[in-house]
């Protein structure tokens, strides 16, 4: 089964795509069946492609720079991307379910601000952790409720909360910086997990990845996420508590962003109001790179893991070479496009051929059924 | 069989994750702390070394101010570095955030940097990384924007108090020592901004008839700076003067004041580059403003970094060194070197400058 | 469509007065909600600070809003067809720099050519987006997210650390945004005309109306024989071209252009469009509403600055108001559909 929309109708007309939030957009391509064979093939194909990409990046990096494949470099690589990786996990689930959450960078910033303010006020750190987790959960709950109860599109809501939560961070901290966190915590940015070369944030990411993978791929909860991404209405009629599940996902995303905020703050030993700005799109890019379909209903945690490797590895490799850093954006965007085109390559070629044939034969695009054209 | 296949994506994912963990855990050193890769030590010898690798890391790439400060062509940091026989590279992120600057610093260290020249995106967020460099005997010279607790030397473009006081004096002269004034600043959290504003307020005490009514923040974004200036003008219709100690801010404010309604009624001064302000000086919107020469700032920073790494300069208070064409400098309190007094630009001299 | 019988009125129910019919029509306009919010907001702000409505401040707001209103026009065309264009900020930035260079004294291209160049640059980017969405069959969120990175990257590469400064332009370029007619900025008038033209096209011409059909129900649209590829491609091309023009205006307005022009504008534009009542799922909404949405957001910004609200509170308030606006709009539209349903039930259709 191809990784695309209208396999069911299979005709040549071009299909515009829908943005997340519209669960009823598709007429259910061949991927809705049970999660067995239907989901296996496209997932394996995408992940295989990603493995190839990761290996290619590793080869390119190591041939261009002798420092690429060193433990120290991997440590730095992991350190710089740990928080984004953690946030990518619930983001993948949210996008699979048909929604999106752009506010993650601001929830990170808000949690960092809460951490800073409470620490400056001499609260015990463990109590602060609890408060930060609650703040993250609340942030996610607000997103979830606005999307499910009020019925607003998640793209719009999370653009609003992107600004709101960043604003709250600004109100809490103002122009202040809190930079005196105890070494036992700021060590997450300096030392690795004992007996390994992994930074703590990556260790946490791996543990979370396993948990998310189990939940997504081996529980009814996970299956229902796929189902509601495929077709929200059908899922609701099938008895799935769509609203409750989606709200839960947003809450998980909020807590994960809060966790990322704590790690980020300790790594930089700085709580300042602009912590995390710009990260939301990076997280979305990673999730898209992972093969999670923006239509919902498709994607895997293994893909997320590989996408983190690819994304981080590529940026790191470029930094180590004499590559003009100003062009990094070009490369990231290019990678994203390549990642979507390559699986579609066969179909892409076919559509080009069809488009060319149609243009040369000068025939109007044909409807699937020969209905007389209505004059509006 | 079906059940197994349903688990296939899970299995695949687990396999991938497990193998990656295995690779990471079993890779090279296995020590708890990251081992340093090849990096030559760059200090301690009595004769100056050359051929060192020095990395210049501004707040972000694609920033005209830093391009002037760093480029070889403008006589900036890279010019100084190559004049001393070392190899210099400019690198950074494009987002002017600490998260975007840190990977560039780490990469420089990994690539064997002998010295770092950094304009800090944040006074404390870079410290874990910069301290790591210092621990590896890589001197860190900050310029333009300091990270006070994690660098070897700071090149200050002008004394903080001098900037603050001279700005106020410049404006006071233009508005006749009395009236309401406002400040259009950059980001609310920018250290140098707040330091300068602090000195401005102290200097204002000398002018009892001048009242600072508001400080607004343009966040170094032309659109925001324009809007906050407009808001300031609307909120205080009797405003007589504006100080904008940021090149983006002063340009935005000049754009707003460049109309018959405001020209000569609201005076503007601040920190701006002569190139960008030429138009406003020539049409009378701005009478005078000031700045230092960013290329000289970069040159001095590059020179100092090369000297320290090469062993010919020990960083202690009172030590002196000659920075090529710029002359002699002394290391002052808190390991800071002052570039010099700010230059005042007005219609008389603005066409002599090319930056 | 069912055949309509003559309305069968129950004895005793009043005949609909013509004034009530007018009120119906007004309330049925989705834009009513957003205009109401704007009016209330302006009234409240003006009562606190009367200078908010001074002629200079109104000019400020209008000029600031024109650029976003233009971007909102292009974005609406795309969103109506159930797509999204996230690359508009990057296109604006690229166009701003390149056209600023062209309008400089060294090149001295006449103004109309500068605008054409802006349109051309934007059109090129829009065409690339359109091709990838239609022929490449890649979801527009992915395509435009990628081109956001790519175009911005190209911009940074081209600009390097350079910038165009106000003194390099020939004078007439910078005054575009300052010229006024009877106190209203020329720019606002022109953009208003363009938006009206856009609204007319979307409502009257088949090529415009079919975008709504595509957005409401792509399958039905295809079955009805609508040339979807061509329409969606045109939408993206238009969005790009409009962003290109917005870039020229940006350069004229702010004078200094470097590689950061237009950063993060895409989210603000999407916000404006959503606030303006355009459904993010496509199929409904109007460019007039989106333009008013852009105006509302700029008005909120200006109000916060004029009222002297502590800068620390700006962003939170802006985010809160955005959410409030879309919640209100949703509630209004729910009420509307409910009352419309009730009314047609009453008429016994």
Image (cartoon, helix red, strand yellow):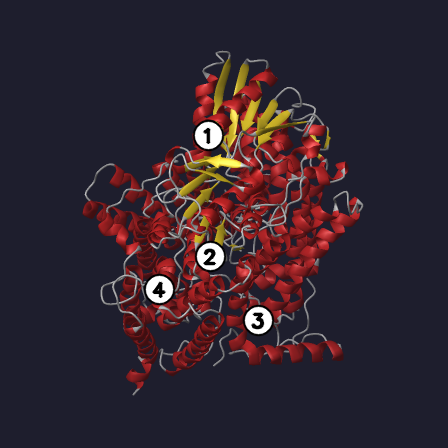
Tell me whether marks 3 and 1 sit on the same chain: no
State whether residue A300 appears in this view.
yes
Crowding around mark 3 (Cα neighbors within 10 Å: few <14, some 14 to 19, many 20+) is many
Tell me whether marks 4 and 3 sit on the same chain: no
Q: Residue at 49% across / 47% down in the picture?
A: B59
Checking the image for residue A281, the label placed there is 2
Q: Position of residue B343 (x, y in %)?
A: 59, 29
Circle 4 residue: A72
Tell me whether marks 4 and 1 sit on the same chain: no
Q: Position of residue C24 (x, y in %)?
A: 56, 43
Q: Is residue C52 above or below residue A115?
A: above
State whether residue A293 appears in this view.
no
Q: Position of residue B276 (x, y in %)?
A: 65, 37
Q: Can you name the residue that lies furthest to the top here? A: B209
Crowding around mark 2 (Cα neighbors within 10 Å: few <14, some 14 to 19, many 20+) is some
Checking the image for residue C40, the label placed there is none
Q: Can you name the residue that lies furthest to the bottom here? A: B1
Cβ–Cβ under 8 Å for marks 4 and 3: no
Pick whichever, B117 or A330, lies toward us.
B117
Crowding around mark 4 (Cα neighbors within 10 Å: few <14, some 14 to 19, many 20+) is many
Circle 3 residue: C137
Circle 1 residue: B160
A116 left or right of B217 in image: left
Locate residue C152: give its quadrant.
bottom right
Pick whichever, B195 or C33, lies toward us.
B195
Secondary element at tag 2: helix
- Chain that bears disc 4: A
């Amino acid at each position: 089964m191809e990784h695309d929309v209208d396999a069911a109708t299979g005709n040549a007309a071009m299909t515009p795509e829908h943005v997340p939030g519209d669960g009823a957009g598709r007429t259910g391509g061949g991927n809705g069946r049970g999660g067995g064979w239907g989901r296996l093939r496209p997932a394996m194909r995408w992940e295989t492609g990603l493995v190839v990409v990761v290996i290619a990046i590793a080869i390119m990096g190591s041939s261009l720079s002798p420092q690429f494949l060193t433990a120290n470099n991997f440590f730095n690589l992991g350190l710089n991307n740990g928080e984004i990786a953690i946030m990518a996990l619930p983001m993948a689930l949210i996008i699979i379910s048909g929604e999106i959450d752009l506010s993650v960078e601001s929830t990170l910033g808000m949690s960092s601000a809460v951490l800073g303010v409470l620490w400056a006020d001499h609260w015990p750190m463990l109590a602060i952790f609890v408060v930060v987790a609650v703040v993250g959960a609340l942030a996610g709950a607000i997103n979830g409720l606005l999307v499910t109860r009020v019925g607003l599109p998640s793209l719009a809501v999370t653009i609003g909360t992107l600004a709101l939560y960043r604003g709250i961070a600004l109100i809490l901290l103002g122009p202040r910086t809190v930079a005196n966190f105890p070494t036992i915590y700021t060590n997450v940015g300096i030392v690795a997990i004992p007996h390994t070369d992994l930074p703590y944030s990556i260790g946490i990411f791996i543990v979370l990845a396993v948990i998310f993978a189990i939940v997504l791929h081996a529980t009814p909860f996970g299956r229902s996420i796929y189902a509601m991404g495929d077709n929200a209405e059908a899922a609701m009629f099938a008895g799935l508590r769509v609203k409750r599940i989606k709200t839960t996902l947003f809450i998980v995303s909020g807590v994960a962003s809060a966790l990322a905020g704590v790690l980020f703050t300790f790594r930089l030993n700085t709580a300042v109001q602009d912590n995390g700005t710009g990260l939301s799109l990076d997280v979305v890019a990673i999730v898209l790179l992972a093969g999670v379909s923006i239509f919902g209903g498709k994607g895997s945690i293994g893909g997320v893991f590989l996408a983190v490797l690819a994304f981080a590895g590529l940026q790191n490799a470029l930094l180590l070479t004499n590559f003009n850093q100003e062009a990094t954006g070009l490369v990231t965007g290019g990678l994203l496009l390549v990642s979507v085109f390559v699986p579609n390559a066969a179909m892409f070629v076919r559509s080009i051929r069809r488009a060319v044939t149609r243009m040369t034969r000068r025939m109007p695009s044909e409807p699937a059924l020969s209905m007389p054209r209505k004059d509006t | 069989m079906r059940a197994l296949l349903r688990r296939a994506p899970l299995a695949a994912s687990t396999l991938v994750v497990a193998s990656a963990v295995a690779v990471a855990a079993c890779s090279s050193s296995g020590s708890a702390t990251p081992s340093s890769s090849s990096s030559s030590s760059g200090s301690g010898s009595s004769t100056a070394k050359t051929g060192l690798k020095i990395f210049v890391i501004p707040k972000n790439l694609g920033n005209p101010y830093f391009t002037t400060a760093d480029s070889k062509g403008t006589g900036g940091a890279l010019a100084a570095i190559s004049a001393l026989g070392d190899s210099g590279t400019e690198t950074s992120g494009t987002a002017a955030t600490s998260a975007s600057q840190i990977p560039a610093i780490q990469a420089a260290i990994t690539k064997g940097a002998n010295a770092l020249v950094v304009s800090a995106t944040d006074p404390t967020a870079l410290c874990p990384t910069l301290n790591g460099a210092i621990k590896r005997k890589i001197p860190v010279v900050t310029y333009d924007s300091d990270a006070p607790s994690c660098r070897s030397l700071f090149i200050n473009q002008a004394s903080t108090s001098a900037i603050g006081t001279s700005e106020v004096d410049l404006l006071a002269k233009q508005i006749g020592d009395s009236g309401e004034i406002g400040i259009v600043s950059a980001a609310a959290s920018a250290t140098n901004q707040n330091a300068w504003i602090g000195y401005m307020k102290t200097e204002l005490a000398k002018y009892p008839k001048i009242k600072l009514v508001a400080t607004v923040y343009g966040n170094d974004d032309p659109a925001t700076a324009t809007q906050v200036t407009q808001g300031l003008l609307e909120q205080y219709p009797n405003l007589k003067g504006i100080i904008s100690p940021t090149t983006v801010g002063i340009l935005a404010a000049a754009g707003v004041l460049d109309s018959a309604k405001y020209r000569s009624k609201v005076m503007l001064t601040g920190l701006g580059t002569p190139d960008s302000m030429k138009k406003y000086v020539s049409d009378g919107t701005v009478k005078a403003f000031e700045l230092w020469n960013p290329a000289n700032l970069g040159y001095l920073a590059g020179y100092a970094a090369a000297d320290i790494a090469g062993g010919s300069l020990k960083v202690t208070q009172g030590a002196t060194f000659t920075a090529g064409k710029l002359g002699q400098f002394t290391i002052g309190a808190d390991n800071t070197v002052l570039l010099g007094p700010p230059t005042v630009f007005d219609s008389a001299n603005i066409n002599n400058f090319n930056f | 469509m069912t055949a309509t019988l003559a309305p069968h009125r129950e004895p005793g129910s009043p005949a609909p007065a013509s004034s009530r019919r007018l009120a119906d029509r007004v309330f049925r306009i989705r834009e009513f909600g957003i205009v109401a919010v704007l009016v209330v907001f302006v009234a409240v702000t003006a009562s606190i600070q009367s200078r908010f409505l001074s002629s200079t401040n109104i000019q400020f707001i209008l000029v600031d809003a024109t650029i976003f209103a233009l971007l909102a026009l292009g974005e609406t065309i795309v969103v109506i067809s159930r797509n999204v264009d996230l690359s508009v900020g990057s296109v604006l930035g690229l166009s701003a720099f390149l056209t600023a260079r062209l309008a400089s004294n060294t090149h001295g291209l006449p103004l109309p050519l500068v605008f054409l160049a802006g349109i051309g640059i934007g059109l090129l980017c829009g065409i690339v987006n359109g091709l990838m969405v239609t022929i490449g069959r890649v979801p527009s969120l992915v395509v435009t997210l990628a081109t956001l990175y790519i175009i911005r990257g190209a911009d940074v590469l081209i600009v390097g650390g350079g910038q165009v400064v106000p003194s390099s332009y020939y004078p007439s370029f910078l005054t575009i945004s300052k010229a006024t007619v009877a106190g209203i900025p020329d720019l606002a008038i022109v953009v208003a005309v363009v938006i009206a033209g856009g609204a007319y096209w979307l409502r009257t011409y088949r090529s415009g109306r079919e975008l709504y059909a595509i957005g409401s129900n792509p399958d039905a649209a295809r079955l009805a024989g609508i040339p979807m590829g061509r329409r969606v491609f045109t939408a993206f091309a238009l969005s790009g071209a409009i962003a290109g023009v917005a870039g020229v205006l940006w350069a004229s307005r702010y004078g200094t252009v470097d590689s950061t022009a237009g950063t993060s504008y895409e989210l603000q534009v999407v916000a404006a469009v959503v606030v303006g009542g355009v459904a993010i799922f496509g199929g409904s909404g109007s460019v007039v509403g989106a333009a008013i949405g852009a105006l509302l957001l700029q008005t909120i910004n200006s109000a916060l600055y004029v009222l002297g609200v502590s800068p620390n509170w700006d962003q939170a308030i802006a985010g809160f108001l955005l959410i409030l606006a879309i919640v209100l709009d949703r509630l209004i539209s729910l009420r509307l559909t409910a009352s419309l349903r009730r009314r047609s039930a009453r008429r016994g259709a």
